[in-house]
Amino acid sequence: MYPNKRQQVQDGRYRTSDLYYAAYLKVAGVQLIDTEREGHRVFFVFEHTPTIKDLKTEYFNRSSKVPALSYADEIRTMKSLTHMGSR
């Protein structure tokens, strides 16, 4: 369904295998829909919103502002999801 890339958009869904970026999206308020496993890689599937592009720019430009403790909590949650597999 998706080509083998770190981030993809299809059918109103946004996928990324970047755990730290996924945690950031979650803290920024983007709804996590599911996780998908492809071999050893886990993809985090989010609702594709109009703000994703801006959030991505802020994240990679290091200009985003999210609560540090919330971000750390989400990293732990995302790591747990990678060990559990698909929900």
Image (spheres, grey):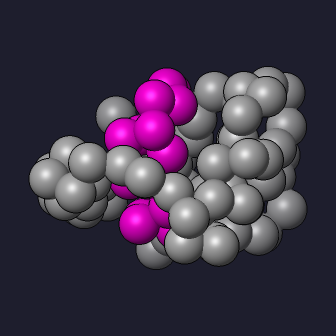
Which corner quadrant of the image does residue 48 belong to?
top right
Question: Is residue 51 or residue 37 the one in the foreground?
Answer: 51
Question: Is residue 53 or residue 15 the one in the foreground?
Answer: 53
Using residue 6 as the reference point, say whether residue 71 is left or right of it: left
Percent of width and height locating residue 11:
84, 27
Number of numbered tags placed on the structure image: 0
Percent of width and height locating residue 66:
36, 49
| Residue 69 visible in the picture | yes
Which corner quadrant of the image does residue 19 belong to?
bottom left
Asked if residue 24 is among those painted magenta in the image, a careful observer would answer: yes
At x 49%, y 45%, the residue is: 25
At x 70%, y 41%, the residue is: 52
Using residue 58 as the reference point, say whether residue 13 is left or right of it: right
Asked if residue 48 is among those painted magenta in the image, a careful observer would answer: no
Question: Is residue 48 or residue 70 the one in the foreground?
Answer: 70
Percent of width and height locating residue 20:
41, 66
Vertically, is 81 above or below 48? below
Percent of width and height locating residue 24:
43, 53
The C terminus - image quarter: top left
Using residue 48 as the reference point, say whether residue 79 is left or right of it: left
At x 14%, y 53%, the residue is: 69
| Residue 15 visible in the picture | no
Q: Which residues are magenta?
A: 18-33
At x 64%, y 48%, the residue is: 55
Vertically, is 4 above or below 69? below
